[in-house]
Image: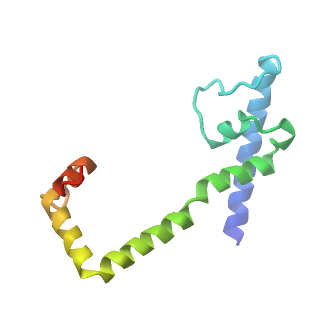
Amino acid sequence: MNLVLLMHKRMRSTAQQYLTLHLAEKKDNGGENPGRFSSGRIDAYRAILSSTLPDIDKEPDRVAQEVLTLLVGGSATTMRVMTRIVYHVNSDPRILSRLTETLDAVMITATANPELVQFWRSKSIL
């Protein structure tokens, strides 16, 4: 739990730094939302601060929470999907055999990196 609190504290601090930059650029633009900071880079903090989110909601805690949601939001879903795929592939010898044959056909060596299209074409799916 301490790690989560430390991470949130750091994210809040980063959000405060970005908010300070955002407000300075907004002031330089005559009150207009700068969209992108002068560096030209865009990241989660900048995207949230330059969004249509009302200014009253662009405070460090809220921005830090939004960034955290973006970072970890899809990990549990992805994990569940991958777990189910591995389970079903391994529980059906026909699927495992077909997958193995298909991969063997396009993976000439253990380090080969074939294009996805090549993989699908090998099975006449495309």
Residue ID at (23%, 68%): 99
The quadrant in which residue 74 appears is: bottom right
| Left-right relation of 55 to 11 | right
Q: Nearer the viewer, residue 87 or 111?
A: 87
Residue ID at (58%, 26%): 40
Q: Nearer the viewer, residue 11 or 55?
A: 55
Tell me if I can see residue 24 in this picture: yes
Relative image position of residue 39 (x, y in whole percent): 60, 26
The quadrant in which residue 96 appears is: bottom left
| Left-right relation of 98 to 10 | left
Q: Nearer the viewer, residue 49 or 99?
A: 99
Relative image position of residue 123 (x, y in whole percent): 19, 58
Residue ID at (74%, 56%): 9
Tell me if I can see residue 113 in this picture: no
The number of numbered discs placed on residues in the rendered structure image is: 0
Residue ID at (77%, 39%): 53
Position of the N terminus, as image quadrant, is bottom right
The quadrant in which residue 25 appears is: top right
Relative image position of residue 79 (x, y in whole percent): 49, 68
What is the basis of the colouring in this image? rainbow
Q: Residue furthest right?
A: 56
| Left-right relation of 9 to 123 | right
Give above or below for 57 relative to 42. Answer: below
Relative image position of residue 32 (x, y in whole percent): 78, 21
Give above or below for 24 relative to 17. Answer: above
